[in-house]
Image (cartoon, grey):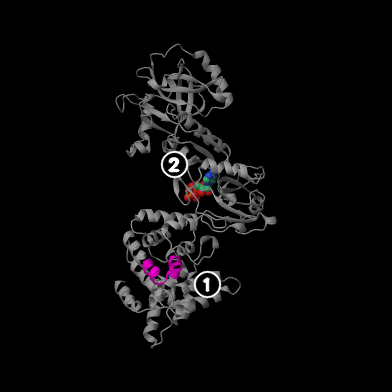
Amino acid sequence: KKAKVEESSSSSSDSSWAEGMPYLVFAEMCAKVEALTGRLEITGIVRDLMKEVISKRPEDLVALLYLLSKEIAPAFENVELGIGEALLMKAIGQACGKDAKQVKAEAAAKGDLGLAAEGAREKQRTLAFGRKPKALVARQVLEDLRAVAKISGSRSQDAKIGKMTKLLTAASPLEARYLVRALGGKMRIHLGTQTVLVALAHAVKPPGMSPDAAEEVVKSCYSEHPVLDALAACVDRPLKEWPARCSLSVGVPVKPMCAKAEKQVTAVLKRFSAQAFTCEHKYDGERLQAHVDNGRVKLFSRNCADTTKKWPDVVSYLREAGPASFILDAEVVAISKDNTFAPFQVLSTRAREAIASDVKVPVVVMAFDLLYLNGKSLLQLAHRERRDLLRTNLRFSDHLRLATGVDVDSKRDDDDDDGRSAIIQEAMEEAIKAKVEGLMVKALDQTYEPSKRSLNWLKLKKDYLDAFMPDSFDLVVVGAYGGKGKRAGTFGSYLLACYDPADGIFQTVCKVATGFSEKELVDLDQILRPRILPARPRHVVAGDSLQHDVLWLDPAVLFEVRAADLSLSSTHKGALDKLHPGRGIGLRFPRFERLRDDKDVDQATTATQVLDAYLEQDAVKNNNNNNDDDD
Ligand code: ATP
């Protein structure tokens, strides 16, 4: 491989740039990169070529960016290559005077059609005396690749083969290798758009600016306006001017903000510590970015492809939505006859193209963010401000709805996390009832971060939580706390304990505030209020912080609860001292399942069972302890 690179290099050293950047220069760079795996080294090679192009033929930078990024046009133009092997073999055969069978055999022997084409051209070259085709120019190659991709219609196969044959006939052996791979959509080099952006940042970085800062600018320009032509057009300008030239605009999809998956409510609370957040329903459909400009509607997928033809019904809903221009971030979800959400499987049966009068799978658009409104980008506004603008500016209907959500205030110094966790759990229960996938928990005071898998958006799927609730626990009610707000007038939460038969004591393991219906709260109040004691019984062991405002209850009634998981705790006292002096085990994020009036206290979950359940947890077994959220 190395020998080949050197041979090719010498052939390109006298290539002229007069007509534009030679495609051979690109092919030689690919050959170098193909032999490498180190990211830094690869980025350096790409950066150097970009610098050369910027100094010699800046107008060709755009072609280089496309060829490098393995795309031939912005995603929303829906122009894709990926020519099938059979067609490519025919073209190679025609260009190199072989039949497709021979090409196939060589491809099988070499393990790659690109190498087969290279070998075939090599043989031809040694046979052709003196006739040298005109050198391929990168810009023209890109045009030809686009032209091949756009050929459609009845005789499109022949036309494609004709165009590819012409291109290959003009190619040197090394060029043929990469042309065939580009046409087939498999370049076999370790280069993706992210590396291209980094290399570009390094190539245009002004002296004194750190590479990281330059990368940040270039990446954020591309996320907001994913069009390589726009980046290339900025190349003669200082980097600080790029963001204004590559910013959000109607008609060009922005790369959507993504969420990080969380498995536990605790992790969500930890992440958002003091911040306010909202828990929105996570709908099980398809991401939809809608751009509306004076009645013209364009719809884009999560990957920025243009999907307008797929959703003619959605186009009409959005045309009637109100503002002159806006960009909406939403989920499109299939809807059943009874107006409940249908699962994604139903949506996935929808055709790629449809006419409005013949839509087989009806949908609703669940709007959750507004990114642009009447000429202004909203990306830099806080989530709550964007949402306010969404609520007040769009006309919602049966087909265009606002995502359901509940807000959780920022935490005050004296708050514990119980209240916040209870809201998340209730929201999750609502989500389960509404047949959605789970929750999207979003920081309310943060900006929109295009293309980032941000920690400011967390997805909490109901299946994750289920996995963390293996067996339920039957726990003894030892205390109660007065309810607030909607729960005023009954107990709002209860203090629960496991039982240690050896010592005859009850050790608290959790405070439960979720899972109760309104009726259950009333019924339980009636059962338990008569059991209030004047003071803590000596055989109930509880941490100090639990003893404020508690009304101690005679330990006689059992609740069945489920929990997210178990952790070591200084507040709770399950299996006290068994693992750690002074510490017990507590249940995290417990949820009331039902009253166990068929069991007595001596049939309650024991301290030993709690200890075993703790030790059974994968996190503990694997030694990455899920400890002490309350320490
Ligand atoms: P990701 O989009 O995070 O790469 P993914 O495509 O596998 O992952 P999910 O893991 O299901 O998708 O979660 C994120 C997706 O959830 C979003 O891209 C969006 O399509 C969908 N979604 C549903 N409801 C909401 C909502 N309220 N807010 C944001 N996204 C939502």
Q: Residue at x 45, y 36 (%)?
A: 275
Q: Horizontal and vertical percent for residue 123?
A: 38, 82
Apparent side of residue 626 relative to residue 226 in the rendered image (left or right):
left
Q: Mark 1 Cα within 10 Å, few/some/many (few <14, many 20+)? A: many
- Horizontal side of residue 274 vs 390, given as left or right: left
- In the picture of the structure, the residue carrying the numbered disc 2 is 262
The one of 152 and 477 positioned closer to us in this rendering: 152
Residue 149 point in image, percent of width and height = 53, 69
Query: In terms of secondary structure, what is the magenta stretch mainly?
Result: helix
Q: Can residue 365 be seen in this snapshot?
A: yes
Residue 313 horizontal/vertical position (percent): 66, 53
- What element does badge 1 sit on? helix
Of 297 and 610, nearer the camera is 297
Question: Looking at the picture, does residue 240 appear above or below residue 382?
Answer: below
* Residue 116 in view, yes or no: no
Q: Residues within 10 Å of mark 2 (few under 14, many from 20)?
A: many
Secondary structure of the residue carrying tag 2 is loop
Q: Nearer the viewer, residue 232 or 530?
A: 232
Q: Amino acid at mark 2?
A: Glu
Res 155 quadrant in image: bottom right
In the picture, the disc for residue 244 is none
Residue 331 lies, with reference to residue 246, above or below; the image says above
Q: Which mark is residue 148?
A: 1
Q: Quadrant of the C terminus?
A: top left
Q: Is mark 1 within 8 Å of ligand 1?
A: no
Quadrant containing the N terminus in the rendered view: bottom left
Is residue 8 inside the magenta stretch? no
In the depicted structure, whether residue 12 falls above or below residue 415 = below
Magenta-colored span: 49-67
Q: Residue at x 37, y 80 (%)?
A: 122
